[in-house]
Image (cartoon, rainbow, N blue to C red):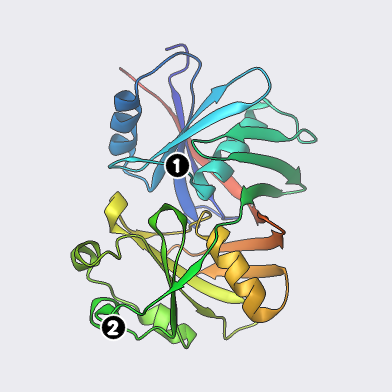
């Protein structure tokens, strides 16, 4: 490989050690899927992104510590940040990513990075009969969405704050990719969210951009507005600005590079 540099970026954060850390590698030669998986397992972050510069776009792939996933918002944000920081695209140029099942358009707006992602359809489902014992609260509604996401709406924000899932049991009961959300009780955001993804080796994801492809249309309808602020209330926390544009979702966030390292292999 010509490029052995790996970056770690805190995405959806404007200060170090907040938001969600992602690994980013710019790859200029062919590498195997197993090699990428080994790097992601070694990094042990929610996702590590591998970016392949092409003539008119960038191919991007995402790996958790255990498997490849089709889409990751925070790793796309982190990758965009590195592309702009390295000067592979200038601040007034858009970035076109091709992921496994969708195209992503990215642009800069001052200190913000703006991602244009597909809207995830949601379908109302019956409330899981063991949900309260597994997670710690009784949801008022539940939905299913793309990529295996199950979305549970709580009556109040404190339900989300106090949620304490049994992660192995979530997998056993078909809730291994779970979004829990409620209307915010402060002026800081319109809604709050936490994401539990033990099925992909991530007990709690600190900040989850892709989940907002389903959350944005849900809360846009509930609150009667298309532009919203989200607060992901994990231990690290993350702030996202989201907007529903017909069948697309705009997600805005900030990012900063924490370190870069050289592979010795």
- Residue 173 position, x and y percent, is 22, 67
* Residue at left offset 71%, top offset 28%: 89
Task: Determine crowd level at label 1: few under 14, some 14-19, many 20+ residues with C-alpha closer than 10 A.
Answer: few
Q: In this view, does 227 lie to the left or right of 254?
A: right
- Is residue 27 depicted above or below 154 in this figure? above
Instruction: Report the front residue among 148 and 41.
Output: 148
Circles 1 and 2 in contact, beta carbons < 8 Å: no
Q: Quadrant of residue 240?
A: bottom right
In the picture, the disc for residue 244 is none
Is residue 188 in sight in this rendering? no
- Residue 254 position, x and y percent, is 63, 51
- Is residue 5 depicted above or below 130 in this figure? above
* Residue at left offset 68%, top offset 41%: 106
Q: Quadrant of residue 171?
A: bottom left
Q: In which quarter of the image is the N terminus?
A: top left
* Residue at left offset 50%, top offset 59%: 211
Q: In which quarter of the image is the C terminus?
A: top left
Q: In this view, does 116 lie to the left or right of 99?
A: right
* Residue at left offset 36%, top offset 22%: 263
Q: In which quarter of the image is residue 172?
A: bottom left
Q: In this view, does 258 lie to the left or right of 131?
A: right
Is residue 125 in sight in this rendering? yes
Residue sitting at the far right? 92
- Residue 139 position, x and y percent, is 40, 83
Residue at image mark 1:
70
- Residue 115 position, x and y percent, is 65, 47
Q: In this view, does 186 lie to the left or right of 114?
A: left
**Circle count:** 2
Element marked by disc 1: loop
Element marked by disc 2: helix
Residue at image mark 2:
132
Distance from the alpha carbon under mark 1 to that under mark 2: 30 Å
């Amino acid at each position: 490989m010509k490029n052995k540099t790996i970056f770690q970026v805190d995405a959806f954060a404007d200060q170090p050690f907040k938001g969600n850390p992602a690994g980013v590698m710019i790859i200029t030669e062919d590498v195997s899927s197993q090699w990428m998986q080994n790097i992601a397992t070694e990094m042990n972050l929610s996702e590590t992104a591998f970016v392949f510069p092409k003539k008119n776009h960038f191919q991007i792939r995402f790996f958790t510590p255990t498997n490849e996933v089709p889409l990751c918002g925070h790793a796309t944000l982190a990758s965009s940040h590195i592309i702009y920081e390295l000067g592979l695209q200038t601040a007034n140029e858009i970035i076109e990513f091709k992921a496994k099942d969708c195209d992503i358009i990215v642009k800069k707006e001052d200190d913000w990075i703006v991602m244009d992602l597909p809207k995830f359809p949601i379908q109302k489902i019956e409330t899981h009969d063991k949900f309260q014992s597994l997670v710690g609260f009784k949801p008022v509604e539940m939905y299913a969405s793309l990529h295996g996401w199950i979305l549970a709406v709580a009556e109040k924000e404190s339900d989300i704050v106090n949620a304490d899932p049994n992660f192995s049991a979530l997998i056993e009961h078909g809730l291994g990719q779970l979004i829990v959300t409620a209307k915010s009780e402060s002026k800081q955001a319109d809604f709050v969210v936490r994401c539990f993804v033990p099925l992909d080796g991530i007990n709690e994801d600190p900040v989850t951009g892709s989940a907002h492809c389903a959350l944005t249309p849900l809360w846009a309808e509930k609150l009667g507005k298309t532009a919203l602020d989200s607060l992901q209330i994990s231990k690290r926390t993350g702030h996202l600005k989201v907007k529903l544009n017909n069948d697309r979702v705009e997600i805005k966030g900030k990012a900063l590079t924490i370190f870069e390292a050289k592979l010795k292999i």
